[in-house]
Image (cartoon, grey):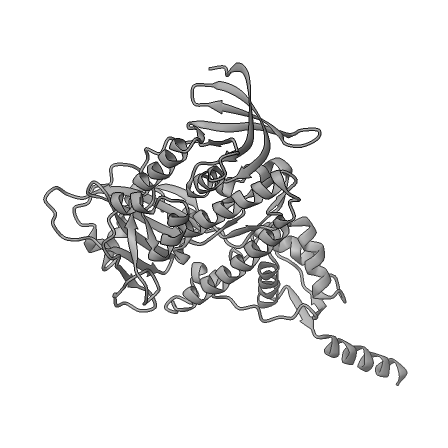
Amino acid sequence: MEAQHSGSTQFLDVLILGGGPSGIAAGIALLKRGDVDVMVVERGDYSEYKYGESLSSGVRSTLEYLDVWQDFAQTQNLSPFYSQVSWGNESQRQLEYMFTPHGTGWNLDRVAFEKLLTNTFRERGGKLRCNSQVITCERQTFRGWRVEIKSKDQQMQTIVCKYIIDASGRRGVMRTNLNLALTVYDRLIGVTCIGQLPEGRNTKLDSQVVACKYGWWHLAPLPDNKVSVVLMTDPDIAHKMQACHPDVWQGLLRELPFMGKAVEGVIFPEKPRSFPCFSSYLKEAGGKDWVAVGDAVASYDPISSSGIPRALANGIHGAFMAVDGLFSSGDLLATYSQSIEQDFKQHLQTQWQYYQRETRWPDEVFWARRRAVVAISKDSIVHATHYFEQKLARAPIHLRANELQDLWLFCELGKPIREVIELFSRRHLHLPEQKILLGLQELIETGYLEIVTEEEEDRVFLNTDRLHFD
């Protein structure tokens, strides 16, 4: 069907790309002013069950700021949240909130929560376009943006706005539009299914987290006697195991000692679906007349169990950036970027600590990628390189095969590792320094590279000079 243009142009103060928790929170926060015209463009319609979520009780202050706490408390089950965790050993222990032995949380009815937020947004004067996506986004000559959106029924509309808040998730509409580099720290995906519990089952189902040699599983109860089950792993591991095949996925699930028993009798009517869960960070959190929030600016491994609280708070901060950009100097953006960077660094440290607790499979690829420690110095120097096999004996752990070969090519004799990293990074902007160092370690471990410290290199040259003199 050919898209039809409505012929009308709508003028707005702020256009929000994405109607998840971060985008809607930004919209509600903006509407507190009463003098800002806001529209949210959302690809879906909020009817689909989502991967099971939970919320820590610390989110209450954020919901109170948005003036939705009372409605939230009336529409959600605020019974204490418990998680049965099998991590680090074969036993299972009960924690009040994921990996935290203290504090409480609640199972979240995600569909009801998003409907609450969107209804609040519309009731307070916000415009919401569901089943619509951005097709083009062009910067205006003096300020603002001209955006073309297309609805599910192929209707096109032009929107001219003064400011954009990008809450489009990991796909990052503005990042893609402006060709900005996203730094990606891992390749984690979730392979998930929504199951239906058998009628008459009276056993209470708690959230479960179970580690295994190829990743980890998470089970979460949903409303309407349903359950969400997701396998967290890396795409190459999932592909090798054929983990997206229904029979394989269910077979792996039922092999788990605790979770397998919990899903006895559960029917999974649909095929498993994969979705990205990688940790990433956008250094340019915004610019002239735009800002990124939520997963569009920084995305987190679900093991942190902080996605929605972060998204809500981040959306509110995005609203502050929009107001500052519209009515003031826009200088707050630098402070916002710094806070995003610091928060993400803290996440990486916490993520690393969580994965360090699981020691049963140190040689398995999934865990080797997450437990590795950088043991070489950037001040070292390339001492020797050896022939790089085009067909590696085993798949690289930290980089892709083509990336590892490219890194090897930059390792010229006598070149400082710091310079190797700098040159390689210019070609592979998405790779963080940590992963490049781990890639260099892998080249050393597999015998393709030798490095020495500056002091050792000096001794080598001194001995060589003495030999020639003699």
**Residue shown at the point (50%, 14%) measured from the top left:** 2
Question: x, y percentage for residue 146?
Answer: 61, 27
Residues 263 and 175: in front is 175
Residue at 66% over, 58% down: 408
Q: Nearer the viewer, residue 125 or 185?
A: 125
Q: In this rendering, does residue 411 appear at all?
A: no
The residue lying toward the viewer, choosing from 115 and 464, is 115
Work out whether 386 lies above or below 160. Answer: below
Q: Position of residue 370 (x, y in %)?
A: 47, 62
Left or right, residue 451 beside residue 463: left
Q: Is residue 80 left or right of residue 141?
A: left
| Residue 410 drawn at (x, y percent) | 71, 57
Task: Tell which residue pokes out farthest to the left in this image.
Answer: 200
Vertical relation: 192 (above or below) 1: below
Which image quarter is the C terminus in? bottom right
At horizontal 61% and vertical 35% (from top left) the residue drawn is: 177
Left or right, 323 with respect to 368, comes to right
Which residue is drawn at the image coordinates 32% and 53% (left, top)?
A: 218
Q: Looking at the picture, tell me which residue is in the foreground, 254 or 122.
A: 122
Q: Is residue 164 visible?
A: yes
